[in-house]
């Protein structure tokens, strides 16, 4: 995946469902449409949860990167 | 003699055709309604999980606390007085608020609950208190059942600030077209 520049970052490491969703929702409120949020997680289930959350909320899921079990998700705020 | 009133045979009555399927989820309102009847800690925990997950997905969420569920909304810094000896006795038996809930299973005089809370904390799972705070922050509507408060002799002042006392009309209004949960 090509390098994506995030406008904001959210650390969800160690958080369990549904806390990351709650935190993402709160963080998204502070962004303007088109801005990109980076979410850090160490939860395998986030690979399913974050795209599903994006489908439901209409935000754009851009993908994730993975290194040393650290997952980095990128979500673009909807218009 | 034939009865002048025809009584339809319930067995032979034609089955009503199912309502035509609308465009699936897209047609349903983006709403969730939870009726929280239980005052069991684990069940209420699950209720808040669903509520907060739905609210964090941009859904409009209503939680209606009735009967035993009302206990969660009681302020812990004051004890409701009740309005007669029976409500006084009942309120004494159900004293406490959010922190006094029991597990529906394996409570074991508080030992099970203590362990459950410790395990959840070790795994970074939010406590009931945090979940209620999140719910309010996410705009989840927290309603207390008016009839339950009347029966128990609980007043508005006995409940948390985030609570609005409402009746079934509100619940039905909110539940129409929403995804309902009864817990």
Image (spheres, rainbow, N blue to C red):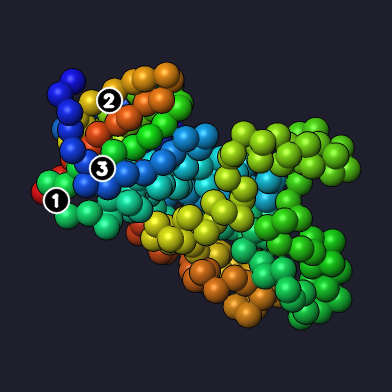
Q: Which residue is mark 1?
A: A33
Q: Depth check: B118 or B169 in front?
A: B118
Question: Mark 3 to mark 1: distance in Å?
Answer: 11 Å
Badge 3 marks a residue whose secondary structure is strand
Give the residue at x 77% y 74%: B79
**Residue A64: which numbered mark, if any?**
2
Answer whether residue B37 is visible to the viewer in this image.
no
Residue A46 spot, x, y in % from top left: 39, 27
Residue A27 vs residue B127: left or right?
left
Of tags 1 and 2, the one toward the viewer is: 2
Count of numbered circles in the view:
3
Residue B140 vs residue A28: left or right?
right
**Residue A37: which numbered mark, if any?**
3
Q: Depth check: B20 or A21 in front?
A: A21
Badge 2 marks a residue whose secondary structure is strand
Q: Chain of mark 2?
A: A
Residue A24, by quadrant, is top left
Q: Depth check: B46 or A15 in front?
A: A15
Looking at the image, residue A71 lies above or below residue B80: above
Residue B40 spot, x, y in % from top left: 69, 46
Question: Mark 1 to mark 2: distance in Å?
Answer: 20 Å
Residue B180 vs residue B118: left or right?
left
Mark 3 and 2 residues: CB-CB less than 8 Å, in contact?
no
Give the residue at x 55% y 65%: B144
């Amino acid at each position: 995946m090509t390098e994506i520049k995030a406008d904001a970052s959210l650390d969800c490491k160690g958080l369990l469902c549904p806390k990351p969703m709650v935190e993402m929702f709160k963080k998204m409120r502070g962004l303007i449409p088109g801005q990109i949020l980076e979410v850090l997680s160490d939860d395998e289930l986030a690979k399913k949860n974050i795209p599903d959350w994006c489908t439901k909320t209409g935000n754009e899921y851009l993908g994730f990167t993975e290194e040393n079990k650290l997952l980095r998700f990128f979500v673009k705020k909807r218009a | 003699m034939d009865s002048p009133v025809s009584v339809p045979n319930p067995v032979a009555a034609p089955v009503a055709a199912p309502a035509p399927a609308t465009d699936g989820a897209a047609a349903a309102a983006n709403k969730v309604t939870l009726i929280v009847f239980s005052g069991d800690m684990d069940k209420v925990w699950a209720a808040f999980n669903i509520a907060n997950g739905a609210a964090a997905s941009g859904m409009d969420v209503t939680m209606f606390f009735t009967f035993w569920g009302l206990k969660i909304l009681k302020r812990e810094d004051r004890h409701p007085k009740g309005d007669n000896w029976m409500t006084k006795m009942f309120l004494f038996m159900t004293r406490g608020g959010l922190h006094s809930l029991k597990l529906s299973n394996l409570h074991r005089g508080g030992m099970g609950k203590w362990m459950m809370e410790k395990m959840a904390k070790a795994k970074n799972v939010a406590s009931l208190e945090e979940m209620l705070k999140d719910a309010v922050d996410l705009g989840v509507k927290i309603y207390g059942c008016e009839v339950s408060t009347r029966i128990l002799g609980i007043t508005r002042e006995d409940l948390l600030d985030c609570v609005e006392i409402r009746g079934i009309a509100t619940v039905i209004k909110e539940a129409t077209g929403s995804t309902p949960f009864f817990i």
